[in-house]
Image (cartoon, rainbow, N blue to C red):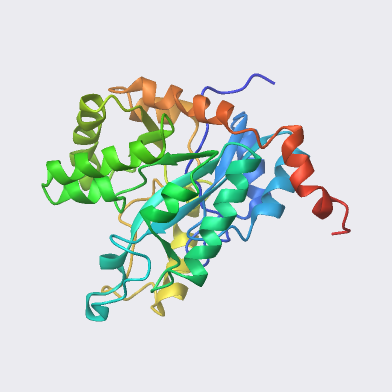
Amino acid sequence: MEHSRFVHLHCHTEYSLLDGANKVHKLFERIKALKQPAVAMTDHGNMFGTVEFYREAMSHGIKPIIGCEIYVAPTSRFERKGVDKGPKEYNNHLILLAMNREGYRNLCKLVSLGYTEGFYYKPRIDKDLLAEFNGGLIALSACLQGEVAQALSAGNIGKAKAAAEGYAAIFSDRYYIEIQDNKLAEQQRLNPLLVELAKDLSLPVVATNDCHYGERADYHAHDVLLCVQTGKTVHEENRLKMETDELYLKSAEEMTKGFEYCPEAVQRTLESRSAANFGSSSASTIFRPFSRRKR
């Protein structure tokens, strides 16, 4: 089977509770249909689906990339002041992808500490922990809720550069500026700024799609899921609602068309795929105790 020239590196499964609508087995059916050689699992703040994700990947002959969309506290993970400001004031998003066994262990450590030490609305870590447990991990700057994108959105280019430089220093040669094309106005405004910032700092750019469901037609089912999460009905106007139906597992052709101004960002997803060795024998060693159990 000839593989497509793109890999999804930002994907939420059903384990992004009441937010991700990708059933794990359906996810791999879709990836196989798209002839994509690998896919990353990056659920919000957790790794609950890791074993199921790995098993399904192996059964479909697709390379699994174990990851997580983590929450980074703006200061210390122990800081909990300002409860009135709400959760968005107290975390930024960051994508982490395990390259090897060391990366997998560090990712498990970071996610666990997010719950046991940093939990405040969300399971948060901080940059002190990233500096200590970054080995074997690739980092992507994440969506519009990432620290770099948030600074650019606020018009603070200096802060955005400082944030990107800080992450690049922690993840030496393993930090990517992430751009997305979900037809959101703020994305379209920020993407050129993100590409320019990456060029100024000599950082690589990578394209993702922040996938929450399999196909465009699944948008409505995902919308219902958000209603369950927020205790609303689909008929209520004042509720959480995604202003796009583009958060699905797109083909390589769709991704290439969306990033015609930066084709290397699409091609670079294969670099991250190659760097993540979770389809190798080292991964099967990690998960051997699980694979021997009856399902």
The part of the image, by quadrant, that contains residue 264 is top left
Q: Nearer the viewer, residue 183 or 48?
A: 48
Marker count (numbered): 0
Residue 196 appears left or right of 29: left
Residue 226 horizontal side relative to residue 198, left or right: right
Q: Which residue corresponds to the image point at 62% horizontal and 55% vertical from the top-left?
A: 23
For image coordinates 70% across by 41% down, the residue present is: 57
Q: Residue at the spot x=62%, y=37% of the render?
A: 100
User: Relative to 158, is 231 on the left or the right?
Assistant: right
Q: Quadrant for the N terminus, please.
A: top right
User: Whole-percent x and y of residue 270?
Assistant: 52, 25
Residue 180: tell me if it is visible: no
Front-lying residue, 25 or 125: 125
Picture coordinates of residue 283, whole percent (x, y): 72, 40
| Residue 153, horizontal then vertical, whole percent | 17, 49
Is 146 or 3 nearer to us in this picture? 146
Tell me, yes or no, if residue 223 can be seen here: yes
Query: Which quadrant would the C terminus be assigned to in this image?
Result: bottom right
